[in-house]
Amino acid sequence: MQVNDAYSPQTPIEGVMHAFTRIGRRLKAKQPGDTIDHSAHVVLFALRCNGALRLSDLAGRLELDASTTSRHIRSLEQLGLVRRSPDPDDGRAFRVELTDEGIEQWEASARHRMELLSAAMEGWSEEDVQTFERLMTRFADGVAARTEAPSSAAWAEKGWAAVAPRPSPRAERSTDQDFAASGDPATRENTDKNLESTK
């Protein structure tokens, strides 16, 4: 089914819903320059935030069934983005973790989307951007407060801030968050604490 961008919402609430539909399908689509698709990005994000996980734990965090998660992992293994390692607590089980290439690919994909958002707000005043961020955060908090999410999904609420990649110099707006690979020990320690709190 094709969504009609020319649709004219009849109420402000319809306008919000329509805007999210337009944004969502574009951000989920593979963009020029992307090296991984949206589903792979989400899996890598979960591993970036949580570290090595058993397949069942990863599936719980992604809110997917084990078979779907397993298919994602097999695909990512073939690309060299994740690897399996023995579970130190159970010799019969294994854990999934990111490879160095997986971290690089996730950071590149996340950085590309941050640059896309920055470009979409080109020409906005700093006040407009700050107002938009404040209202979006307020809206996200309102949605989160009125919907149920499994406790295993709590990591996603604060995971992004802890692992957000530094924008490239081309991005007009910068972020105060540095990613875990930063050379600054204080920043790395703070990031590690944020990551630990998501587990």
Image (cartoon, helix red, strand yellow):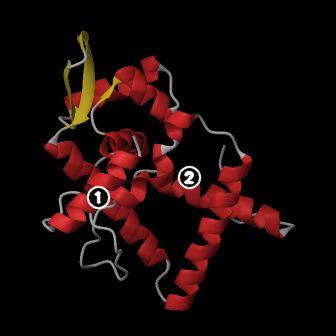
- Placement of 133 over or under 30, stated as above or below: below
10 Å crowding of disc 1: few (<14), some (14-19), many (20+): many
Q: Quadrant of the rendered structure where residue 33 is?
A: bottom left
For the view shown, which residue lies furthest in the top direction?
92
Image side of residue 98 versus residue 56, left or right? left
- Placement of 100 over or under 6, stated as above or below: above
Helix, strand or loop for disc 2: helix
Q: Residue at x 41, y 26 (%)?
A: 57
Image side of residue 65 versus residue 96, left or right? right
- The image's mark for residue 112 is none
Q: Which residue is mark 1?
A: 191
Q: Quadrant of the rendered structure where residue 170 is?
A: bottom left
Residue 169 at x, y percent in the picture: 24, 78
User: Number of numbered discs present?
Assistant: 2
Q: Residue at x 66, y 43 (%)?
A: 1
Quadrant for the C terminus in the image: top left
- The image's mark for residue 25 is 2
10 Å crowding of disc 2: few (<14), some (14-19), many (20+): few
Residue 24 at x, y percent in the picture: 57, 55
Residue 181 at x, y percent in the picture: 18, 58
Asked if the residues shown at circle 1 and circle 2 are in contact, with their CB atoms under 8 angstroms apart, the answer is no
The residue closer to the viewer here, 175 or 21, is 175
Q: Residue at x 36, y 22 (%)?
A: 55
Residue 34 at least partly seen: no
Q: Quadrant of the rendered structure where residue 109 is?
A: bottom left
Dot 1 or dot 2, earlier in sequence:
2
Three-letter residue code for mark 2: Arg
Three-letter residue code for mark 1: Thr
Q: Residue at x 62, y 59 (%)?
A: 22
- Mark whose residue sits in front, 1 or 2: 1
- Placement of 111 over or under 145, stated as above or below: below
